[in-house]
Amino acid sequence: TFDVRVMQDGKPVTDATVSTEFYMAAMPSMNMPEMRTKTDLAHVGDGTYRGKGQVTMAGTWDVTVRVVREGQEIGSKKITLTAK
């Protein structure tokens, strides 16, 4: 389960479309293609968005969280996550 809290000008955003995209680069030496997984999150209250997704293997993933309102991206955040 992925949780994201979205704030704008110090106030919770409750009317956006929020998604996460996990990306792992290809590892040709291990015969592994690049991997991507996207999860759409639903608003559960007070600017918190939640959704269930799957990280398919251990390792380092680049994660991008996107926030869209009325068809326009109002924010994004990139982080690195290590799954064990």
Image: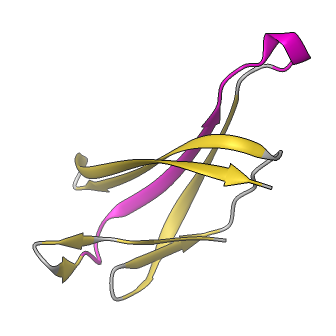
Q: Is residue 7 visible to us here?
A: yes
Task: Report whether 9 appears left or right of 66.
Answer: left
Residue 58 at x, y percent in the picture: 81, 47
Total numbered labels placed on residues in the image: 0
Residue 50 at x, y percent in the picture: 54, 73
The image shows residue 53, relative to residue 46, as above or below, that is above
Task: Report whether 76 appears left or right of 1.
Answer: left
Residue 53 at x, y percent in the picture: 70, 59
Colouring used for the render:
secondary structure
Task: Report whether 13 appears left or right of 30.
Answer: left
Compare residues 72 and 78 and report the one nearer the observer. Answer: 78
Give the quarter of the image for residue 26.
Answer: top right
Q: Residue at x 33, y 80 (%)?
A: 47
Question: What residue occupies the far bottom of the structure in this picture?
Answer: 45
Quarter in which the N terminus is drawn = bottom right
Compare residues 17 and 63 and report the one nearer the observer. Answer: 63
Residue 24 at x, y percent in the picture: 67, 32
Task: Report whether 27 appears left or right of 40.
Answer: right
Give the quarter of the image for residue 22.
Answer: top right
Compare residues 26 and 43 and report the one nearer the observer. Answer: 26
The image shows residue 44, relative to residue 39, as above or below, that is below
In reply to whether residue 59 is colored magenta, the answer given is no
Q: Residue at x 80, y 56 (%)?
A: 84
Q: Is residue 31 visible to us here?
A: no
Q: Residue at x 75, y 55 (%)?
A: 54
The image shows residue 57, relative to residue 30, as above or below, that is below
Q: Which residues are magenta?
A: 13-32
Question: What residue occupies the far left of the structure in this picture?
Answer: 9
Q: Residue at x 74, y 53 (%)?
A: 83
Compare residues 49 and 17 and report the one nearer the observer. Answer: 49
